[in-house]
Structure formats: C-alpha cells, structure tokens
Image (tube, grey):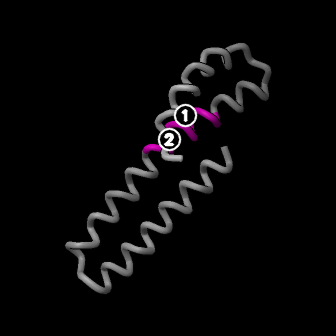
Amino acid sequence: MTINILFTLQIAGRIWFHRKRVLAALGPEQAKMYTGIAAVVVESALPFTIQNVVMLGLFGGSNTAQNLFVSLLVQLECIGPE
C-alpha cells in the first residue's frame, strides 16, 4: 500500500513539475493538459488506497467482514495506475 501511494505521488509530482515548465515556456493553454493527466493518475489510485486502509483496519481487528473486501481488492488492483 505504501509503495502504491509513493509511486502515485511521484508520478503526479513529475507531471506537475513538467506542467510548471510548460507553463513558463508555452503559456497556460498548453499547460492545462498536464493538470488533467495528474488528476487522472491520482483519482485512479484513490479507490485502491481507501479500500486498502479499510481492509487493513478490519484485518488488524480480526473482523470477519474483511472477507467481503478481498474480492473488491482484487478488482481495484486492476484499475490502479501502477
């Protein structure tokens, strides 16, 4: 879970860094695309991260409800950007 969060933050940070350079060189119209790309990367990793936090809490508390989240975890792993 930590690696996915770190990779997502690194990817988004790199995109925002390039956006800043494009903004300085070409203007705001050309840099707008980079904001949308960074938002897509963060939004695609967000459901997986939230589900992992919930699953970790249930697993740590030895709650049997964790079994309901296992199938969802597998499906959300396919959606994530990494």
Residue lying at 71% horizontally and 32% vertically, measured from the top left:
56
60 relative to 50, above or below = above
Q: Which residue is mark 2?
A: 80
Residues shaded magenta: 44-53
Asked which secondary structure carries label 1, the reply is helix
Quadrant of the rendered image containing residue 74: top right
* Prevailing SS of the magenta stretch: helix
Question: Mark 2: which secondary structure?
Answer: loop
Up the image or down, 54 lies above or below 36; here it is above
Mark on residue 77? 1
Q: Quadrant of the N terminus?
A: top right
- Picture residue at 40% right of the left edge, 58% below the top: 38
Classify mark 2: residues with Cα within 10 Å, few (<14), some (14-19) or many (20+).
Answer: some
Q: Residue flagged by tag 1: what amino acid is it?
A: Glu
Q: Is residue 10 above or below residue 43?
A: below
Magenta segment: does it hold 46? yes
Foreground residue, 81 or 64?
81
Whether pointer 2 and pointer 1 mark residues with C-beta atoms closer than 8 Å, the reply is yes
Crowding at mark 1 (Cα within 10 Å: few <14, some 14-19, many 20+)? some
Left-right relation of 49 to 17: right
Name the image quarter holding residue 7: bottom right
Q: Amino acid at mark 2?
A: Gly
Q: Position of residue 52 (x, y in %)?
A: 63, 35
In the image, residue 5 lies at what x, y percent? 60, 51
In magenta stretch: residue 45: yes
Q: Which mark is residue 56?
A: none
